[in-house]
Amino acid sequence: MTNHKQAIYQSQLDHKSKLVLRRRTKRRFNPRIFFDRIIETTAIISLLLTGFSGVGAMACWGLEIIETNNPNIIISGWEQQKNICLGAMLVSFSAFLGTSLVGASLSIQRDKF
């Protein structure tokens, strides 16, 4: 009986020691990966904003064409909306170009060309 209990106890110790060996290590903060993800996210968001602002500007230009062809239809406020959409397009496309330039310069710096 004592031998059987010792065998069970020994197998439990082996199991616990295996658990200790399989313990995960903590991930360290890597600033290079962090900055790469920020640059990538900013570039994607700015491209999406550019596209949506472009669609809004095209809609405002369509309203302008409708108003010039049929002066009886009065659509107010499209000029201001068109300018807002065009301004948002310009700013977001500039942000895309800026993040692309920063990302390219960082990758060239890491490659040591």
Image: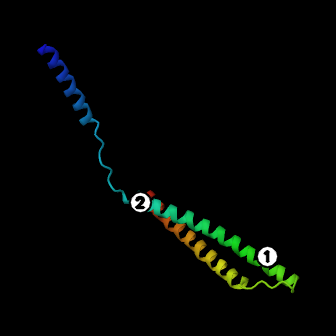
In percent of width and height, residue 8 lies at: 19, 20
Observer-nearest of 22 and 101? 22
The image's colour scheme reads: rainbow
At 46% across and 63% down in the image, what residue appears? 38
Q: Select label 1 or label 2 by which is in front.
A: 1
Marked residue nearer the N-terminal end (1 or 2): 2
Give the Cα distance between marks 1 and 2.
42 Å
Q: Is mark 2 on a helix, strand or loop?
A: helix
| Above or below for 34 versus 86 | above
Residue drawn at x 74%, y 74% is 59
In the rendered image, the quadrant that contains the N terminus is: top left
| Badge 1 amino acid | Gly
Residue 109's image quarter?
bottom left
Local SS, label 1: helix
How packed mark 2 is, by other alpha carbons closer than 10 Å (few <14, some 14-19, many 20 or more), is few
What amino acid is labelled 2 in the image? Phe
Task: Give the image quarter of residue 24.
Answer: top left
Residue 34 disc label: 2
Q: Residue at x 79, y 81 (%)?
A: 64
Q: Which residue is drawn at 56% across and 65% down?
A: 45
Residue 25 higher or lower than 2, as above or below: below
Q: Name the residue under label 1.
A: 62
The residue closer to the viewer here, 64 or 108, is: 64
Up-down relation of residue 44 to residue 12 (above or below): below
Q: In this view, does 41 lie to the left or right of 22?
A: right
> Quarter of the image holding residue 11?
top left
Classify 10 Å Cα crowding around label 1: few (below 14), some (14-19), many (20 and above): few
